[in-house]
Amino acid sequence: MADQRVAVVTGASRGIGRAIATTLAAAGQAVVVGYAGNDVAAKAVVEEITAAGGRAVAVRADVATESEVSAMFDTAVDTFGGVDVVVNSAGRLALSPIADLDLDVLDELHRTNIRGSFVVAREAARRVRTGGAIVMLSTSVVGLQLPNYGAYAASKGAVEAMTLILARELRGRDVTVNTVAPGPTATDLFLDGKDEATIARLAAQPPLERLGAPADIARVVAFLAGPGGRWVNGQTLRANGGIV
């Protein structure tokens, strides 16, 4: 299967990242399931993909650690022959008013969301083959500017700032670089700790009057990573059902 496209997806053991990994696999791509620490969940993603006839391997890597990210890409090359698509779905969330934010929490958040995004993007820029795609994950909170999201929005704003710059730096490579910024999405992480009234209020925000599903975001990423998205480059796509 020398002509099969190969995707590296970080944060792929659960939530949106898992949906992206399985969606890309269903579209015919071999997938490296990158994950931070949940071995059981990552193994389950690989088993789901292989049971459906796809090819996948799980690799544990901290996205902010250069050597681990490099090793993850090495696995993609050694196992599947190269890298065509990179999706950085790994991220960390911490909520606090700016005035009360623990700076140690800020440092941890930015280590994953900014440094991690940069490390993955840098490795992707070095490794992705001609005709490939790099997709980063941001958040629609960057535009909504909600209280308590200051640190998180700042970190994802940095990701969006990288997008067009990296696209321009890859001129002549035929590699696209885009960012997807989801709105409220019904993952276990998002729903945890929220009562029904809060969930209902958030679901009522978009004109479509529902929360996003991980599959909604995964399909957008798959479009950008596939043949239909080749003329979309250097963009941040807000996949949020119309929240403004």
Image: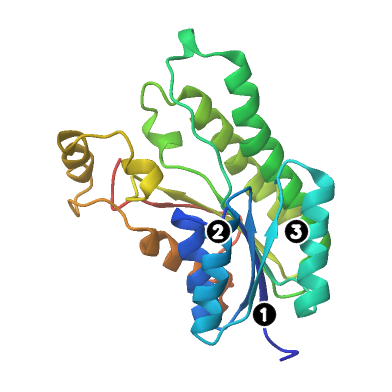
Q: Is residue 134 above or below residue 55?
A: above
Residue 142 located left or right of residue 169:
left
Q: Residues within 10 Å of mark 2 (few under 14, many from 20)?
A: few
Q: Is residue 209 above or below residue 78?
A: above
- Of 161 and 48, nearer the camera is 48
Most extreme residue toward the front is 40
The reply to whether the C-beta atoms of the residues labelled 1 and 2 are less than 8 Å apart is: no
Q: CA distance from mark 1 to mark 2?
A: 26 Å
Residue 101 located left or right of residue 106:
left
Asked whether the viewer can see residue 181, the reply is: yes
- Of 116 and 38, nearer the camera is 38
Label drawn at residue 122: none
Q: Nearer the viewer, mark 3 or mark 2?
A: 2
Q: CA distance from mark 1 to mark 3?
A: 14 Å
Residue 205: quarter of image: top left
Residue 214 located left or right of residue 210:
right
The reply to whether the C-beta atoms of the residues labelled 1 and 3 are less than 8 Å apart is: no
Q: Position of residue 185 (x, y in %)?
A: 34, 49
Residue drawn 63% across and 30% down? 110
Q: Which residue is mark 3?
A: 124
Q: CA distance from mark 3 to mark 2?
A: 26 Å
Q: Amino acid at mark 2?
A: Val
The mark nearer the N terminus, 3 or 2, is 2
Label drawn at residue 5: 1
Q: Position of residue 152 (x, y in %)?
A: 51, 30
* Secondary structure of the residue carrying numbered label 2: helix
The mark nearer the N terminus, 1 or 2, is 1
Q: Amino acid at mark 1?
A: Arg
Label drawn at residue 40: 2
Q: Nearer the viewer, mark 1 or mark 2?
A: 2
Q: Residues within 10 Å of mark 3 (few under 14, many from 20)?
A: many
* Secondary structure of the residue carrying numbered label 1: loop
